[in-house]
Image (cartoon, grey):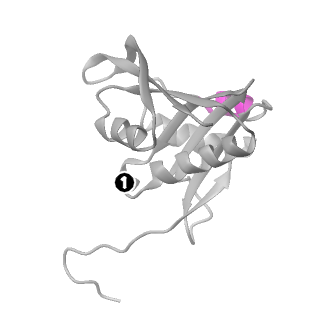
Amino acid sequence: MKLPFGTTRKREFAIEMLRPDHAPALARLHAGEFTRAWTDGEFSVLLEQEPVFGFAAREVGQPKGDPAGFVLARQAAGEAEILTITVARARRRQGLGWLLMDAVLRELHGQRAESLFLEVDETNLPACSLYRRLGFQEVGKRPGYYELAERGRSNALVMRRDLR
């Protein structure tokens, strides 16, 4: 089918629970987005821990290959935290961050968690906007937390969302 100039096909994504065997694909995606990327060994160890869980987003009809994005979280004693979340650059602005965070929030609701924390680079305006739309509020700041290859260091905003 030929699409008129300037239109794009809306992509659909399926969300699936992460498993330790996803670790190599997660490491590849993470390496493309973070200055200090986590290794497949680090992902594998995390995914084998009981309080750690996560979700991957895959384009419907593309079950093989690396996910378009993923989120990794940990929950203990009623509090949860996002360990890392990333969406491939080519897949941004398609709602994947929202889908991944929604999956985490649903899981935490089922686990009866009370709050969810995350840290975000204060210069990452799209992510900050997403988290605010999801009900997160800034509760702190970590000066110089992120190392950015092109700009040196950046502050992390610590954000929290109450889940009850």
User: Would you say residue 94 sits in the magenta stretch?
Assistant: no
Which of the image's four quarters has the N terminus? bottom left
The residue shown at (30%, 73%) is 8
The residue shown at (48%, 35%) is 31
Which residue lies most toward the left here? 5
Q: Is residue 16 above or below residue 150?
A: below
Which amino acid type corresponds to the residue marked 1 in the rendered image? Answer: Ala
The residue shown at (60%, 37%) is 163
Residue 81: percent from left, percent from top: 60, 28
Identify the residue under disc 1: 90
Which of the image's four quarters has the C terminus? top right
Which residue lies most toward the bottom here? 1
Q: Is residue 69 above or below residue 43?
A: below
In magenta, the rendered stretch is: 39-46
**25 and 80: which is toward the camera:** 80
Which residue lies most toward the front here? 164
Mark 1: which secondary structure?
helix
Give left or right: position of 127 versus 5.
right
Residue 106: percent from left, percent from top: 64, 49
**94 and 132: which is toward the camera:** 132
Residue 5: percent from left, percent from top: 19, 79
Identify the image quadrant of residue 65: bottom right
Q: Is residue 55 above or below residue 151?
A: below
Around disc 1, counting alpha carbons within 10 Å, would you say few (fewer than 14), some (14 to 19), or many (20 or more)? few
Residue 60: percent from left, percent from top: 56, 69
- Figure label count: 1
- What's the magenta bit mostly, secondary-structure-wise? helix
**114 and 56: which is toward the camera:** 114
